[in-house]
Amino acid sequence: MKDTNFIISLNHISKWFGEKQVLNDVNLNVKEGEFITILGPSGCGKTTLLRIIAGFVTPDEGVLEIDSKMMNDIPPYLRPVNTVFQRYALFPHLNVFDNVAFGLKLKKVPQTEIEQRVRKSLKMVDMTDYEWRDVDSLSGGQQQRVAIARALINSPHVLLLDEPLSALDHKMRTDMQMELKAIHKNLAVTFLYVTHDQEEALTLSDRIVVMNDGVIQQIGTPIDIYNEPVNSFVADFIGESNILNGTMFKDKIVNFLGHDFECVDEGFGENIPVDVVIRPEDIYLMQSPNKASMFEGIVKSCIFKGIHYTMTVLTDEGYEIIIQDYNPFEVDTKVSMIIKAQDIQVMHKERLCNEFEATLVDETHLKMLGTTYECEAQSIYQGEDVKVIVEVDFDKLELLDDFEKAEVIGDVRFILYKGDHYHLTVMTEGRVNVYVDTNYVWDERDLVGIKILPKDMRIKFAAE
Ligand code: ATP
């Protein structure tokens, strides 16, 4: 049965700009009165999703419903939503009152009603005494409040907010966050908020939608998302984390950092490769030697962060981990560490190696990633093209800054530090993701050549 409590329903929404798919099968139900935040890195498709709801962008696939009515063909001005933009988009030559009244005047609403509604709107954002001020004379935060008052004047059912605080300085931003929360609480309006700032999302939201590359990664309350990230992308994006390769040895025993640890997870099977996430505040530091110690290391850096200290520790087994503690430990101190079973988050790995679709075009050549590669002689080639899958381990791809020596070029999209190496997602020009383990330091957006040697390809028949 259909749940009528959802004010917004996105069903299988996809969007392409030219060849580029920016939203991929997005499904989301927003409850009435909810404060929901779409969070993700720059370019992940957040604004496009918001613009689809507002009606400024049309989806190529899928259905959008607002208030249980199909909205795909309804123009923006007939939708029960209003948008507050990053830049306040106020008219500089009009005062506060006229900025807020602008839409009502266009609609030829009677003057007495305009006055009532503007006053009510300004009251909601605590700007009652500012009606006759020039907007230029207001601070950034006050201008943003006027923009919100203007958006609220038509009593929209949904307020769409596109990074509305990004132009403000840190202090103003945190003040405005509190005010936005208060405004949301006082109005029975659904807020759909877009940001790339995870702290803002954790502070404001009833639920967070984490997006990457046009795909929803996880939807949950701030606490769920922080404590139970579903994959290493979410764990890395929300707060600081130690994300490490591990092996689930058996139920409740996981090996990482070169040691076996008790954990609370079961049902993975035996000797299964996993990702392990440990929040920096969940590693307990003690002066060495210490009887309770589970593993040891040396402090490499210690930075005061206001309330706690953030330290990097190089473990005796050669892993670099981050730890937060209220007490500082001096650089070069030998330390002992403990991790409790309930603080170890074990996750299935999304993949164990690269798997590329390819075609064997003769015994020693295949077409893959938009180019032709040499491979070791394949007896499965019998005179006709054969569809194959080529497996390549993450540490067998070489990244080069000399493109001449590489078969394919890509750009670095996502970097995960795994304690003793980096795990990179590189997107090729043909938009295939390639995953690489490396010890070299690359930056996001770097262009890299990708080299694969014939001996490092495992070639298998593609399943029909
Ligand atoms: P940011 O936080 O940087 O604003 P975002 O997550 O909001 O990013 P979008 O603005 O939705 O991302 O953009 C997603 C992708 O779609 C980007 O690669 C962007 O360049 C591309 N894009 C957005 N609008 C258009 C357009 N009108 N034509 C072509 N490409 C577009």
Image (cartoon, grey):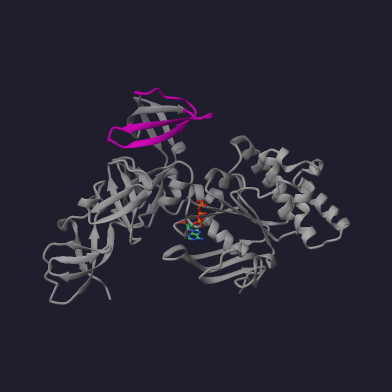
- Number of numbered labels in the structure image: 0
Nearest the viewer among 436 and 54 is: 54
Q: As drawn, is 114 to the left or to the right of 88?
A: right
Magenta range is 304-333
Residue furthest to the front = 93
Nearest the viewer among 235 and 142 is: 142
Q: Is residue 317 magenta?
A: yes
Q: Where in the figure is residue 16, as x and y percent of width and height?
A: 46, 66
44, above or below 63, in the image: above
Q: Where in the figure is residue 5, as x and y percent of width and height?
A: 66, 66
Q: Quadrant of the N terminus?
A: bottom right
Q: Is residue 260 magenta?
A: no
Residue 115 visible? yes
Quarter assignment of residue 408: bottom left
Q: Residue at x 86, y 60 (%)?
A: 110
Nearest the viewer among 193 and 93 is: 93
Q: Quadrant of the C terminus?
A: bottom left
Residue furthest to the right = 112
Q: Residue at x 22, y 51 (%)?
A: 404
Q: As drawn, is 190 to the left or to the right of 264?
A: right
Q: As drawn, is 172 to the left or to the right of 285?
A: right
Q: Residue at x 39, y 53 (%)?
A: 347
Q: Residue at x 25, y 64 (%)?
A: 368
Residue 292 visible? no
323, above or below 85, in the image: above
Q: Where in the figure is residue 369, as x and y percent of width and height?
A: 27, 62
Q: Where in the figure is residue 138, as x and y percent of width and height?
A: 71, 39
